[in-house]
Image (spheres, rainbow, N blue to C red):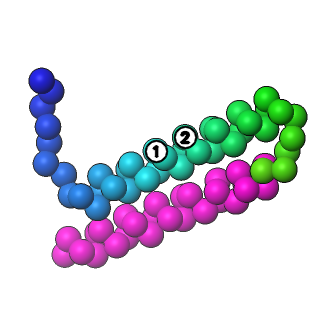
Amino acid sequence: MGHRRKTNSSIANSIALNGLVVVGMGAIATHAAHTGLGSFLPTLVAIALVGPISTGMIARYIEERQR
């Protein structure tokens, strides 16, 4: 089996949430490309803009908590 590393659960949850957001964005983009409907593309843009902000906020929270 692989080597498991003990990590902060907040960090692991943040990484998992970012992964789910990326998968969701891919699903929205794939659906738009497959159907030719761009009705959800503004949602995709909004998620793309909010994602880095939320990641920064989580990182700042974790940094403050470790002090």
- Which residue is at a point 70% across and 59% down the rendered structure image? 46
Q: Nearer the viewer, residue 9 or 57?
A: 9
Q: How many neighbours does mark 1 have within 10 angstroms: few (below 14), some (14-19), or many (20 or more)?
A: few
Examine the rendered structure and indicate whether residue 38 appears above or below residue 65: above
- Which residue is at a point 37% across and 70% down the rendered structure image? 60
Q: Mark 1 points at which residue?
A: 19
- Residue 26 as seen in the image, left or right of residue 20: right
Bounds of the magenta segment: 41-67
Mainly helix, strand or loop, the magenta region? helix
> Disc 2 on helix, strand or loop?
helix
Look at the image and say whether residue 54 sits in the magenta stretch.
yes
Q: What amino acid is found at the position of numbered circle 1 in the picture?
A: Gly
Label 1 with label 2: CB-CB less than 8 Å:
yes
Q: What amino acid is found at the position of numbered circle 2 in the picture?
A: Val
Percent of width and height locating residue 4 = 14, 37
**In the picture, which quadrant includes the N terminus?**
top left
- Which residue is at a point 71% across and 51% down the rendered structure image? 44
Look at the image and say whether residue 49 sits in the magenta stretch.
yes
Quarter residue 8 falls in: bottom left
Percent of width and height locating residue 36 = 87, 34
Which numbered marker is on residue 23? 2
Examine the rendered structure and indicate whether residue 22 appears above or below residue 1: below
Percent of width and height locating residue 31 = 74, 36
Examine the rendered structure and indicate whether residue 40 appears above or below residue 30: below
> Disc 1 on helix, strand or loop?
helix
Q: How many neighbours does mark 2 have within 10 angstroms: few (below 14), some (14-19), or many (20 or more)?
A: few
**In the picture, which quadrant includes the C terminus?**
bottom left
